[in-house]
Amino acid sequence: MFEANEDYLKLPGSYLFSTVAKKTAAYVAEHPEAKIIRMGIGDVTQPLPPAVIKALHKAVDEQADAKTFRGYAPDLGYEFLRKAIAENDYRDRGCDIRDDEIFISDGAKSDSGNIQEIFQRDNRLAVCDPVYPVYVDSNVMAGRTGEYDERTTRWSRVIYMPCTEANGFVPDYPEKTPDFIYLCSPNNPTGEAMNKDQLQGWVDYANEKGAVILFDAAYEAYIHDENVPHSIYECAGARTCAIEFRSFSKNAGFTGLRLGATVIPKDLKDHNGVALWNLWARRHGTKYNGAPYIVQRAGEACYTKEGKEEIREMVGRYMHNAAFIRKSLADMGYATYGGVNSPYIWIRTPNNLTSWEFFDLLLSKANVVGTPGSGFGPSGEHFFRLTAFGSEENSVEAMERIRKM
Ligand code: PLP
């Protein structure tokens, strides 16, 4: 008799965004006249840049001709894209990363969720609290997180690093020593980013403890401050302790197209001298047949002169919204964070409301949907996340409604 994987059964409740969607749908069913403004889920709204569309059309035409047709992609990605990424995102920034240390994938969600497979099952993980839920849930599915405590909403074998107003939303080094540590900067959901010294501190810590940092750089394109690093490899010593995830979703609008990359330096070895590069290459070879050729060509187009300009303009539009939302809420008296180096604005709920109470209030009084901070972890309680990914018109309208609320 077959039996379902019990580790999957340990996952508590429903996924944050499905609860948000259900509550919103229930409200709309009761109030069909309501004009809802969605500032909850982190999906982009602007169309793909013209340079990307052009590359897609060309690649589609190549697939129509036997002379230029491409079948299975190379396991680790096409050379043209690995080179473009290594050159533009790394070497041009002074980071020592080679083309063959880039692994192409269908996005940062898959890679940040799957990477835990290359660590021993008894390795201890550390995560920020609040955190992007994928890091914890993927380890739950792998049976690595111990028992769940419904009261504290914490797993017994996960090391939580609270990110609060008190520490400026930058985690302190944990008391227990982790084997691998998820860091995301600029961060989802707090919208705050680590500066160079702070990230260097983490790299030094990881090298000293023999730990690996799994660095999620999905929001790198939103960095505005000069002292915020765009890659962990800007820090000395990162080649021996860090893996980095990249995404084409938030910069170039590939949330539907799907493309990402993971960087594993060949110097990154465990205490027995085993290179993680080899394990990830083996995993790709066995479990993955590559991002589609046409999508990899679309990714390459992001690094052309036109592509770069178009992406800068698109990100600029979202960041214009972010600055407006942040300022509007601050003017209304909300304690407001993020929104400077990221498209997320993180606010403290008024009158000590819980995150879900504020969600209900905002939905019913302003018809605005956001994301309750408590859904990202216990330290997110009494906080709320709004995104700047909507249109300017909707951002203005939403702020007007919240002001009147
Ligand atoms: N990493 C973080 C921190 C995210 O917030 C998201 C999406 O919201 C992702 C990764 C997913 O990226 P991708 O679309 O490349 O899978």
Image (tube, rainbow, N blue to C red):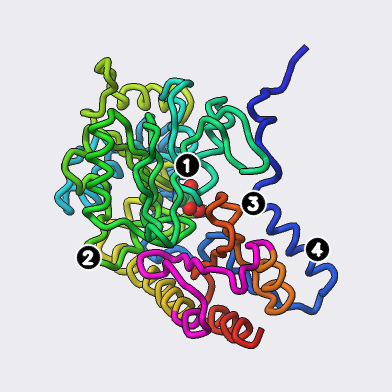
160 within the magenta span: no
Say which element carries label 4.
helix
Q: Disc 2 on helix, strand or loop?
A: loop
x and y percentages locating residue 256 in the rendered image: 53, 53
Q: Residue at x 42, y 39 (%)?
A: 105
Which sits earlier in the primary sequence, circle 2 or circle 4? 4
| Mark 2 or mark 1, earlier in chain | 1
Residue ID for mark 4 = 26
Q: Secondary structure at mark 3?
A: helix
Give amino acid for label 4: Ala
Quarter of the rendering occupied by the N terminus? top right
Q: CA distance from mark 4 to mark 3?
A: 16 Å
Question: In the picture shown, does residue 369 fall above or below 3?
Answer: below
Q: Where is residue 39 drawn, in percent x and y?
A: 58, 68
| Structural distance between the alpha carbons of marks 2 and 4 | 44 Å
Lower position in the chain sequence, tag 4 or tag 3: 3
| Amino acid on which the number 2 mark rests in the picture | Glu
- In the image, what residue occupies the spot 61% across and 53% down? 375
Q: Quadrant of residue 353?
A: bottom right
Report the magenta residues as a range.
327-356
Residue bearing the label numbered 2: 226
Mark 3 or mark 1, which is nearer the start of the sequence? 3
Pinpoint residue 48: horizontal percent, then vertical percent.
45, 63
Q: Residues within 10 Å of mark 3 (few under 14, many from 20)?
A: some
The residue carrying mark 1 is 160
Whole-Å distance between the Cαs marked 1 and 3? 19 Å
Helix, strand or loop under label 1 = strand
Q: Quadrant of the C terminus?
A: bottom right
Return the mark for residue 16. 3
Q: Residues within 10 Å of mark 1 (few under 14, many from 20)?
A: many
